[in-house]
Image (cartoon, rainbow, N blue to C red):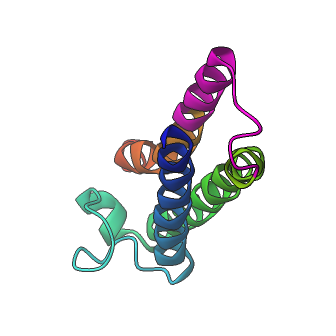
């Protein structure tokens, strides 16, 4: 049951990251109704808007790709029908990897907050 939960968490993380990247590729990061809350300086300057869209598209695509990698080992454990398991250290590694993926996905949003001050 725990493996299904971990598998589901990485699937959701990948889906959310892909949706965020889609907003960046469609250049709608500064559109508050579709995109995200960004500083007024970024909304007003076309170059900063473009940079915000590029940041979200690039980093969220990276987070989506990174979140798919653990699906292979977890999926093989699930498909083995109880014949395989993951050690406690393996679960710790999955948790740390998941945190790293979240940090990669959150980076552009923190960077956008500071774009106007650069």
Return the residue nearer the eye: 73 or 115. 73
Q: Is 12 positioned to the left or the right of 76 in the image?
A: left
Query: Relative to 107, is 58 above or below?
Result: below
Taking the spot 62% from the left edge, 31% from the top edge, the residue there is 94
Which residue is at the far bottom?
Answer: 26
Q: Main secondary structure of the magenta part?
A: helix
Query: Relative to 80, is 85 above or below?
Result: above
Residue 113, given in percent of the width and then of the height, sits at 35, 46
Taking the spot 64% from the left edge, 61% from the top edge, the residue there is 58
Query: Relative to 59, is 15 above or below?
Result: below
Residue 96, given in percent of the width and then of the height, sits at 58, 25
Range covered by the magenta-colored residues = 80-99
- The verdict on residue 20 being magenta is no
Q: Quadrant of the C terminus?
A: top left
Q: Is 34 positioned to the left or the right of 46 in the image?
A: left
Residue 86, given in percent of the width and then of the height, sits at 69, 28
Return the residue nearer the eye: 74 or 82. 82
Query: Relative to 27, is 20 above or below?
Result: above
Return the residue nearer the eye: 43 or 6. 6
Residue 36, given in percent of the width and then of the height, sits at 30, 65
| Total tally of numbered discs in the picture | 0
Report which quarter residue 97 is drawn in: top right
Q: Is 58 positioned to the left or the right of 115 in the image?
A: right
- The verdict on residue 89 being magenta is yes
Taking the spot 41% from the left edge, 42% from the top edge, the residue there is 110
């Amino acid at each position: 049951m725990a493996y299904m939960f971990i598998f589901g968490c990485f699937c959701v993380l990948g889906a959310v990251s892909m949706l965020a990247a889609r907003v960046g590729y469609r250049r709608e990061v500064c559109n508050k109704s579709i995109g995200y809350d960004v500083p007024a300086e970024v909304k007003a300057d076309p170059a900063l808007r473009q940079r915000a869209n590029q940041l979200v598209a690039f980093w969220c695509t990276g987070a989506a790709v990174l979140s798919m990698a653990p699906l292979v080992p977890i999926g093989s454990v699930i498909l083995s029908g109880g014949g395989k398991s993951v050690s406690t250290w393996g679960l710790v590694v999955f948790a740390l990897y998941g945190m790293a993926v979240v940090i990669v996905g959150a980076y552009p949003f923190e960077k956008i907050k500071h774009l106007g001050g650069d």
